[in-house]
Image (tube, coloured by chain):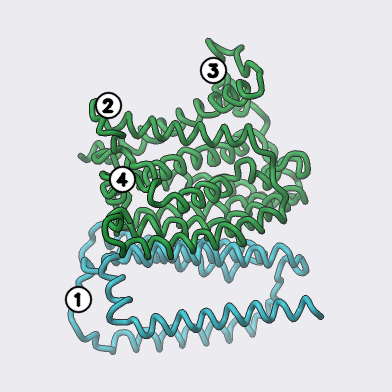
Amino acid sequence: MQAWMWLGPVIMLFVVLGFVTLAILFERKVIGWMQSRIGPNRVGPWGLFQTVADVLKLLLKEDIVPQKADETLFKLAPVIAFVPAFAVVAVLPFTDSLVFADIGVGLLYFIAISSITTIGILAGGWASNNKYALIGAMRSAAQMISYEIPLVMALVGVIMAAGTLNLSGIVEAQKEMWFIVPQFIGFVVFFIASLAELNRTPFDLPEAESELVAGYHVEYSGFRFAFFMLAEYVYVFAMSALTTVLFLGGWNPLFGFTFLPPLIWFLLKFSLIVFTLIWIRATLPRIRVDQLMQLGWKVLLPLALFNIFLSALLKEIPGIGSYY
Amino acid sequence: MQWNGEFLAFFLLSVMAIGGAVFMIHFTRVVHMVLALAFTFLSIAGIYVLLHAEFVAAVQVLIYTGAVSILMLFGIMLTKHRTSDHSDSRSRHQLLSFVGVAAFFGVIMWVIYHTPFSGGKAETAKYTVANLGEWVFKQYVIPFELTSVLLLAALVGAVILAKKERDA
């Protein structure tokens, strides 16, 4: 038990790093396929070592701190951005036995800790002393704050149906019916808001390369830049896992196909979410800043509130009430 | 006083919280101050976890470390006038402040040691989210509703103030 306590998180770190390496390759391959290109295919068989080569290149690059930058904060910001990204992985239940911290308020913990990353992004953008970096950081913070509200509100329906904030408990509650069916509005709102939280296309305004060069990490090079990218992809991992847990029934099998182990079921659903994220990136154009705020406050928030109201109402109807 | 893990964690977290507060006063750039403040908020959330108040801890991180700090950073970054705050250091003034602070510390310590803390230990294991929800919505439902009405009034007031500014 003691050895597992120490070794578990280390193994998890390597699993997450492995996921990030593969996910970047997968993303480039899938987008290449959708755009009728081949994608990376030079390094290793099927381009398998492309990301490894990219990371090595980043490690070997010169570490530049701009002269006018706030040096301490500039160096600290990638750390503030990355640590919460890995800390949220602790509460994710992969199967009923494979969970690191089974705490009572797991869902709130996830949402709360992930909001700290915004401080890292904001600090990095400000410390760079560059107007593009600052604008990117501002956009990022505004976007993350605005979309956190519909994100949490969309989850209220799930919490009401499961009757708990514990993530393992939420999965247990989906034995009969996955929440994506009764909580469909909640799922749609949550998924759009999570895209915005992840700063992914069509909500990648913080790093819109055509207008902001690269956004908040424009002054970063080498390993510090890699840390920001790493934080972003670890959040893709965490958010996909959370979506699986909350709406797709976690490790519960579909149609009672129990011959596949629970972990495989989890991975299948998880991969589906990751693929959908990439699919959306290859399909949709970026939206404008004013449209972003309109969508968040005038469409998603009322929808999420309506979902809460509807869930509470349907909970009282006999027959289907047990699903809510 | 036993020297166990809980005490060690409490010690570290309080040092972090107080350290953050001291740094917040000590820093000269406003952005650094807010970051130190966020650090203090985070350490206080850790102390809540030690008290088994997980819900309060999560909300503390969500509201204070997340939202409030970011809001302050926003305000400071967008209003760029006077990025650093240089205080004048008169030695006599500093001496007087030190005497004042020391006296205040003495009084507080005296009061703490002379106040009898009545009542037994609370059973913190009962403070689960489910129990908390039941208390808020059953026993304390009227204060809860009053708070929500107050917040609603504040929200409406803020909207009206913002609207007036735009018309002018």
Which residue is identified by label 2? A260
Q: Earlier in the sequence, mark 3 or mark 2?
A: 3
Identity, as a three-letter code, of the amino acid under mark 4: Met
Mark carried by residue A177: 4
- As drawn, the chain in cyan is B
Could you tell me if the residues under marks 3 and 1 are in contact, i.e. CB atoms within 8 Å? no
Residue B81 position within the rendered picture, expressed as x and y whole percent measured from the top left:
78, 68
Chain to which the residue tagged by mark 1 belongs: B
Q: Which residue is more in the foreground, B103 or A28?
A: A28
Q: Residue at x 72, y 56 (%)?
A: A290
Nearer the camera: disc 3 or disc 2: 2
Could you tell me if the residues under marks 1 and 4 are in contact, i.e. CB atoms within 8 Å? no
Could you tell me if the residues under marks 2 and 4 are in contact, i.e. CB atoms within 8 Å? no
Identity, as a three-letter code, of the amino acid under mark 1: Lys
Nearer the camera: disc 2 or disc 4: 4
Identity, as a three-letter code, of the amino acid under mark 2: Leu
- Asked if residue A78 is positioned above or below residue A15 in the image, the reply reads below
Which residue is identified by label 1? B121
Mark 3, other Cα within 10 Å: few <14 / some 14–19 / many ≥20: some
Q: Earlier in the sequence, mark 2 or mark 4?
A: 4
Mark carried by residue A49: 3
Have a look at marks 1 and 4 and say if they share a chain.
Answer: no
Q: Residue at x 28, y 89 (%)?
A: B114
- Asked if residue B163 is positioned above or below residue A27 in the image, the reply reads below
Could you tell me which secondary element the residue under label 3 belongs to? loop
- Distance in Å between CA atoms under marks 3 and 2: 30 Å
Could you tell me which secondary element the residue under label 4 belongs to? loop
